[in-house]
Image (cartoon, rainbow, N blue to C red):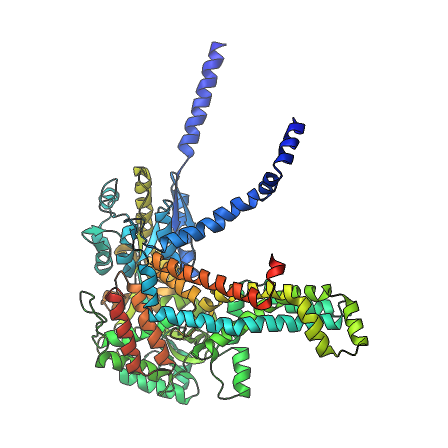
Amino acid sequence: MRRWWILAVLGVSLLGLQVWAADPIKLTFQTLFHEADAQAMEQIINMFNETHDGIKVELIQGGWTQYYAQFRLSVISGNPPQLGVCHTNKLVEMADYLTPLDASPVGNLLKVAGIDPDSYVGANWAAGELGGHHYLIPLDTHGWGLWYNKDIFAEVGLDPEKPPQTLEEFIDACERIKAAGYYAFHPAEDAAPRKLRRAWYVFFWQMGGQLFDKDYTHATFNNPKGLLALQFLVDIFNDFGWNKPGSNGYSQFAAGQLGMLVAGNWYYGTAVKSGVNWGYAPMPNFFGTPYTWGNSHQLVIPLQPAGTSKDVYLAATEVLKFISENSHIWTMYGGHITAYKPEAENPELLASDYWTKSGKWLNEMAQKGLVHFPINHPKGSELEDAIQAQIELAVNGKISPQEALDRAEEDCNRILAGG
Amino acid sequence: MWGKFGHFLYRHRNLEGILYVVPFLGLWGVFLAWPVGYGIYISLFDWNPLKGSKFVGLANYVQLFHEERFWNAFANTFKFAGMTIPLIIGLGFLFALMIWGWGRSRRGTVTVQSILFFPYLLNVSIVAIIWKWLLDRDFGLVQHTISRIFPSAPVFLTDPAWALPAIAFATAWWLAGYRMVVLQAGLEEIPKELFESAAIDGARPWHQFIHIIMPLIKPSLLFTLVLTIISAFRTFGQVLMMTEGGPGRASEVLALYLYWVGFDYFQVGKAAASGVILLVLILILTLIGVRLLGLKSELQ
């Protein structure tokens, strides 16, 4: 009888141990990715889950418009995900809601996980520093480039393999395309207000313009450079007749009605599906330095509630590292250029259609430091809103470019002054 | 035991009534009263739970009242309501009268009724996407047709003067069907004898409309009016998706302004203050509506 008891106790204990051992650390990874991005990240996370028995990552993905508000509220409510994403330019706004990776409650996670800063693109890594701490692990660089319709180019006598790269070449191309009855050029994807603002940024930055002074005390864009940049943007949709205000460049290009479109690398999937015979080129040099608008997704550990175990932090860091080390998938299927240098040399990536047809050009712009990140300020969203509201009115011909800059400057200065 | 309990209930008849409403009161308290109360509370703070919220009194309200953008949103809300409320109720009433006059038992009535009601079944996002497509500059069917008929027609969603009316029209298309059903039910309640007597007395249809339909439809009209005032003043989704408040800030209404301030700029105290203002505004306008329709006694 006694022997049976011992066996029973042993059996129950073993069962318990097995259950305990089989219970993985559960992490939630909330992203702002959608469409191709979301599918690419899902591939990476599925790979992680398949190869790591001790950690189970649940991926929650969705639109980015409310992402940061949700992120903040989840931290405030004490129920944050263990992994998240943050744009480079949001660090100043979001730092209070993030775990400093080099000074987490359980120590320096970067050291523990063996994350080497030198493995990442320098500018992207540096963007994760704030107030002496490091918060972000770079995932990618993404940004705008020039998509063009090779068939239209051939039809109007332009070399389909030599897209315009200077202002003169560009104007010539636009005029020829316009004369053939097509929309010549769209500088801002679907012309949403923020896209128009970015287009203006590109022209302004190319002239060497700075939006604000170094300490963000006042706006510095209401000057001849800012005005010329905005006048150029307005003329594209009006006087030059290269397009019309309110037009959606995505749709025009996919319908084969547009010669050249400035759009992000995320347009790749749509371009392929559209059936248009397209080409991709770096942003032309309109005004001096061929900057383009871009940004960087970075991986973060949101600020965790007090008492979160060391195992959770370590598991989360392991996931971050895994994503970096497999980020060629992110580039191949999501279209964003990996910020992890060894992965940028991945043979599968280098041989992929995406890389050879467009990714390599974006990578080239990134490597040359021509991908200009947006402003990084605690009131960045409000400032950019103030600018884009006026840019949109100017593009639609409702106010003059000078009036738009005057109003935007006044609004920005009020916001910076705490109004 | 039940005898004693029954006796207890009989002696405390009011308590029984209260017990009936406790489940509702509980839910109402948790999901409405408490959030509204807390919203009012945080409107008095520079709200930042991570670093500590700071009591600022009425500073958020003062800041709002000094902000041009707030007043623009405030004015746009009234403009939008001024367009959308008559449009929704007018169309709903017109449809209801048509169907009521046509007769429910006649062939095709249910089909027409279903077609008119159908948009109401759609989610606001779908409505916004449909109308954004229809009004698209390059490929929009409505935009294209109007531009063919009137070559100088504006591009509705990118013209500051036309963005709000376009959204108001889309909103009316979406919501009028439900008002039609409510008002049609009100019309069905009117005794047929009244119309017969009036006809014998020589009253023409217009007189019947003024002297029979209008007085007796008042309760249904009040219901639709209150409902429409509330939905017009807190309009959000269709504006966000169709114009994002633009061009410029031409279609930015209060609820959208609140959203940007609260969820994009994360100035939660200020957003809460604008929410309180919106709440008070809707309350006042609803009470005015009740007064104007002279339905105080019905409500009591």
Q: Is residue B252 visible?
A: no
Residue B253 vs A258, above or below: the answer is: above
Residue B253 appears left or right of B9: left
Residue sitting at x 21%, y 57%:
A126
Give the quadrant of residue B290.
bottom right
**Which quarter of the figure has residue A113?**
top left
Furthest residue toward right: B200
Residue B272 in percent (x, y) is at: 39, 57
Comparing B12 with A343, the one in front is: B12
Residue lying at the far top of the rendered structure: A1
Q: Nearer the viewer, residue B257 or B296?
A: B296
Quadrant where the C terminus of chain A sits is bottom left
Q: Is residue A287 above or below residue A95?
A: below
Residue B254 left/right relative to A336 = right
Residue A19, compared with residue B190, is above or below; it is above
Residue B25 on image: x %, y % = 53, 46
Q: Position of residue B183 (x, y in %)?
A: 66, 66
Residue B68 visible to the viewer:
yes
